[in-house]
């Protein structure tokens, strides 16, 4: 049975345009967009009409970096696919791309199947997968080709975490060479993990065990060095490269230099690096453990370089790296030894609001907000124009956003399954009001109306930015 909804009177904002327009949704897709008050818009008929006067009508957010149920440091990320995608919906994100994990000694397929089993039937919004490659060998390389063919078109490698996810330069080069042939995109966690482990050992030997030392040993120069090395390996392989969670000014400089040379090199940063700093890591009474993530939070002066990179397009995407661990019972595993604190922050619910605040603060424009949070991640990972914009034929993933509503971020009101907020007490202006996922209202006037199992797996094409 056909279902039609029209959203009237809002300011439709995409990466390229702003227009007071009415949006007609039918059978899960955008059927038409027409300037409000025109005969074309007046002709829209629907069973349901939503008044968006005074509000923004924006594409659902695409968060291309989440870790639901990730095993790490002897525990698991506290959000399941059910709780994490519900929180995403509350925050105006209608698509996540999560990371399936290959374990050393096991096939890629085994890891991918395990993540499909976690997610299937449990998601409130649509989802896709990247593949973490932990064990590069001949069989793994062959499997990469097969995964690209079926819509898993990006592969993450780690220059950090020796003994867990780490790949050496030879393994990285081989994977990059394969992606150069099969059209896949290598995503890189760029930190010199071998050197960092030496610094960790030395710090602990000196009795430096508090959370703030996590940031001090994971030096910005070691992020920059690894970023430079990853860029050069990709250049040797003739492969594109996407560097995840860029946090340091020196790493941004490496990306900018590579892009000035015309290389297919891309960079992502995250809200925590734009809004938080080492001041948080240094909070007393082990509170700093809440802010332990890798790459780590940096001194506040790095933020200007990240904002500038977003404005100049040397950084193209803001994702969350959502990987929550509760303070009680999980972050506390590292009391007396910062190296045992599970690495990760909650944020999938906060990203769209924080970036809207960045618009109000003058860091970015409204259209750039939509570009870095919706359109570019969709293009980068082969989901555009199905996701990431509002246009006839696209999925009806639409958010009605109140730009004037004020809120205070807090663990007492968020919907992520974690016992603290990284932004506790932060006042922001702007809030999600209603969210449609493929035309179905999953949040309606600040009430959750979605359900587990609405979200479907979405295969992806290859990166749409390659030259």
Image (cartoon, rainbow, N blue to C red):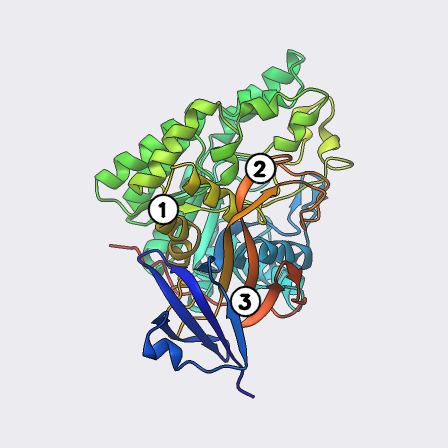
Cα separation, mark 1 vs mark 3, equals 33 Å
Is disc 3 placed on a helix, strand or loop? strand
User: Up-down: is 284 above or below 376?
Assistant: above
Number of other residues with Cα within 10 Å of mark 2, as a class: few under 14, some 14 to 19, many 20 or more: some
The residue at the point 69 percent across, 23 percent down is: 337
User: Up-down: is 128 above or below 202?
Assistant: below
The residue at the point 60 percent across, 36 percent down is: 423
Q: Which residue is mark 1?
A: 241
User: Up-down: is 398 above or below 412?
Assistant: below
Is disc 1 placed on a helix, strand or loop? strand
* Image marks 1 and 3: residues in contact by CB distance under 8 Å: no
First along the sequence among labels 1 and 3: 1
Q: Is residue 228 visible?
A: no
Percent of width and height locating residue 23: 42, 71
The residue at the point 36 percent across, 46 percent down is: 241
Which mark, residue 436? 3
Is disc 2 placed on a helix, strand or loop? strand
Quadrant in which the N terminus appears: bottom right
First along the sequence among labels 2 and 1: 1
Which mark, residue 427? 2
Q: Is residue 212 visible?
A: yes
Foreground residue among 390 and 176: 390
């Amino acid at each position: 049975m056909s279902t039609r909804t029209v959203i009237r009177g809002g300011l439709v904002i995409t990466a390229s345009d702003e227009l007071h327009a009415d949006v007609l949704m039918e059978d899960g897709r955008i059927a038409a967009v027409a300037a409000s008050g025109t005969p074309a818009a007046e002709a829209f008929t629907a069973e349901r009409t939503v008044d968006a006067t005074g509000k923004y009508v924006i594409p659902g957010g695409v968060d291309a970096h989440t870790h639901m149920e990730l095993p790490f440091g002897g525990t698991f990320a506290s959000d399941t696919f059910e709780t994490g995608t519900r929180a995403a919906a509350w925050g105006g994100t209608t698509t996540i791309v999560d990371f399936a994990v290959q374990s050393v000694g096991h096939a890629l397929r085994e890891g991918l199947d395990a993540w499909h089993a976690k997610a299937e039937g449990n998601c409130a919004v649509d989802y896709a997968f990247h593949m973490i490659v932990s064990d590069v060998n001949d069989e793994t390389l062959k499997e990469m080709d097969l995964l690209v063919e079926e819509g898993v078109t990006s592969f993450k490698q780690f220059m950090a975490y020796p003994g867990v996810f780490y790949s050496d330069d030879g393994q990285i080069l081989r994977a990059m060479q394969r992606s150069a042939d099969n059209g896949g995109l290598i995503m890189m966690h760029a930190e010199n993990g071998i050197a960092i482990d030496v610094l960790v050992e030395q710090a602990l030997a000196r009795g430096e065990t508090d959370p703030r030392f996590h940031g001090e040993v994971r030096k910005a120069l070691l992020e920059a060095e690894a970023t430079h090395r990853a860029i050069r390996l990709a250049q040797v392989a003739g492969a594109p490269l996407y560097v995840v969670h860029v946090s340091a000014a020196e790493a941004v400089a490496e990306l900018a230099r590579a892009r000035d040379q015309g290389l297919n090199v891309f960079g992502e940063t995250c809200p925590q690096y734009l809004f938080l700093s080492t001041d948080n890591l240094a909070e007393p009474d082990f509170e700093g453990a809440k802010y332990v993530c890798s790459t780590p939070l940096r001194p506040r002066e790095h933020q200007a370089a990240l904002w500038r990179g977003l404005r100049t397009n040397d950084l193209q995407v803001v994702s969350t790296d959502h990987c929550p661990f509760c303070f009680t019972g999980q972050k506390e595993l590292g009391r007396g030894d910062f190296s045992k604190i599970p690495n990760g922050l909650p944020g999938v619910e906060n990203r769209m609001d924080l970036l809207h605040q960045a618009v109000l603060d003058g860091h970015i424009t409204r259209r750039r907000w939509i570009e870095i949070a919706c359109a570019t991640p969709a293009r980068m990972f082969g989901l555009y124009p199905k996701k990431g914009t509002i246009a006839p034929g696209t999925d009806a993933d639409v958010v009605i956003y109140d730009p004037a509503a004020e809120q205070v971020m807090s663990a007492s009101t968020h919907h992520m399954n974690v016992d603290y907020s990284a932004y506790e007490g932060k006042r922001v202006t702007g809030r999600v009001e209603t969210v449609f996922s493929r035309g179905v209202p999953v949040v309606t006037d600040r009430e959750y109306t979605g359900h587990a199992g609405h979200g479907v797996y979405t295969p992806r094409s290859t990166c749409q930015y390659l030259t």
